[in-house]
Each structure stands twice: as structure tokens, then as C-alpha cells.
Image: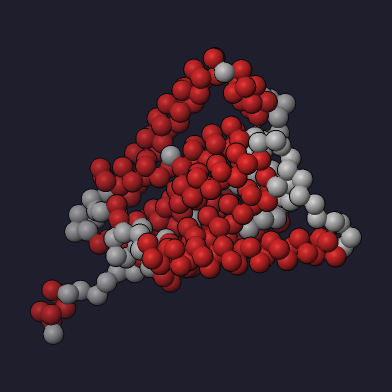
Amino acid sequence: MTASYEQHPPPLEFHRLARASDRYRWWRPLAVGLLAAGLFGSMLLVLFGGLAIWALVDPQLEGAMDASFSESSDHIDLGDPIIFAVAMVSLALILPALLLATRLVGARSVGSLASVVGRIRWRWAARCLLIATALFAVAHVAILLMTTLRGDPVILRPDRSDALALVVLAVLLVPFQAAAEEYLFRGYLMQTLGGWFRRPVLAIVLPVPLFVIGHEYELFGLIDVAVFAVVAGWLTWRTGGLEAAIALHVANNVLLCVLGALGLADINATDARIGE
């Protein structure tokens, strides 16, 4: 029995996967985080440097950037396709930075950030995405129906002539933005904490404040984000991977962006919303 156990140890839970490698040391996750932050910053410099050069020859881009990032602007306008694309790409860059840092100093497979089988389980991910899309679609339809019953008619009013471009960008870019955030908060941070603490509740709950801080919402919006983070963390631990959390994040954000493009929601709203 002892020999058999040594040859086939019980599998680790998702939040403990940082310890799957014999080369695990308590400080390695911190080194990964520092390197990932440096790589992410370098990628942002390249991105915004390229945009600055592009803006010199494209007045439309220069005007959009000036309007969104001027001192008089309270927040960036995600309803502008150019600004939306820049924002989504900026967040998506977290993913390659984190994967590269894990590869270089993490002393383990980057696939272990995704699931207990060392990779994204694509069939399971597709099933989760279908279920999440159906759930959020029903929720948003119910909200629109309640709005109508209160006497406020629902009318398709695209806020901009380039609404179609915003929809296309949402479908193409939001999955990468959502996946990047899930790899960071429900992958890297959960497993970093799981390497230090055995109890899954600590790995699930402790990253929540950092996730909330990254969203500039009002009180109810922040509470909503915190609830989403706890649910996503629990699903990640329970299912042994990021697929369900990514599916929830993608379905919610894409639907919000599509509704915003159609004039049925405010894409820049700071009140209660699910996820993002």
C-alpha cells in the first residue's frame, strides 16, 4: 500500500497545483508575479507607443484618445470602438505576460494554471459557455421585460453609427480580456495562495478585494463584482479548472457590450452589473 501510494499520489486540488512540481518553493509564485508585472508593463509601453505613432497620422484616433484620456474626462468611453479595442487589448496582455513568466520562473507547466489536467478542457468550456450565455440572456431579457412593465418602452437605439463595429470587437476581443482576468485572479492568485494555505476558502476569498479594486463602480456595482468573484472562485475550485469562470465572464461581458451597442444598456455604467 505504501509503495503504491508513493508511485501514484492522490491528485492535488486546483488551488494546490502550484505544489505539483518538485521544484516548488514558496517564493517562486512571487517571482512569477514580479516578472509578469514587468512584462505586462513593457507590453503596454509598446502598445501605447505604437498608438501614439499611429495617432500622429490618424486624426480620428488622436481625437478619440484625447477625448477619453483628457483631464476633464471622468472615465474612458467604452462606447467608442477605438477606445474599446484599446481597453480590451490592454487587459488581454495580462495573459501572455503571466504565461511567459510562469514558463520562465514558475518551474511548472503553464497548463497547470488552467486546470487539474494541465490544459483547457475545450468540450467542457464550450458546454459552460452555452449554459452561461443562456442564463445571462434570460436574466437580461427579464430585466428588459421588467423595465417595459414599469412603463419604460424598450426601443433599439444604437448610440452610434458604428454599433456593428462595437459588436464585432466585443465578440473578438472580450473572450481574451475575460480569460486574462480569470487566469490572473482565479488561476495565478488562487494557486499562489493555495501553495501557502491548504484551505480552499482562503484561496477563493483573499483575491476578491483585488478583483473588486480593479473595477470603478459604485457601491452596488462593487458588491455585484465581489459576488461574481466568489462564485467564479468556487466554480474554479469545484470543477478543477478555469473553464466555468471564463465562460461566465465572457458571456456576461459580451452580452453587456452587445446590449450597449444596441442602445439597450449603458456600457459605461458604474452601478450594479454582474461580473466584468
Determine whether, in the image, residue 90 is placed left or right of residue 19.
Answer: right
* Quadrant in the rendering for residue 98: top left
**Vertical comparison of 157 with 121: above or below:** above
| Residue 231 vs residue 173, the one in the foreground | 173
Determine whether, in the image, residue 239 is placed left or right of residue 21.
Answer: right
Spot occupied by residue 109 in the image (x, y as percentages of width and height): 25, 54
**Vertical comparison of 146 with 255: above or below:** below
Residue name at image x 87 percent, y 63 percent: 150
Spot occupied by residue 241 in the image (x, y as percentages of width and height): 39, 64
Spot occupied by residue 215 in the image (x, y as percentages of width and height): 61, 47
Spot occupied by residue 243 in the image (x, y as percentages of width and height): 43, 62
* Quadrant in the rendering for residue 11: bottom left
Residue name at image x 59 percent, y 66 percent: 134
* Quadrant in the rendering for residue 137: bottom right
| Residue 133 vs residue 199, the one in the foreground | 133
| Residue 22 vs residue 95, the one in the foreground | 95
Residue at the limit of the structure toward the left, as seen here: 3
Residue at the limit of the structure toward the bottom, as seen here: 1
Residue name at image x 76 percent, y 60 percent: 144
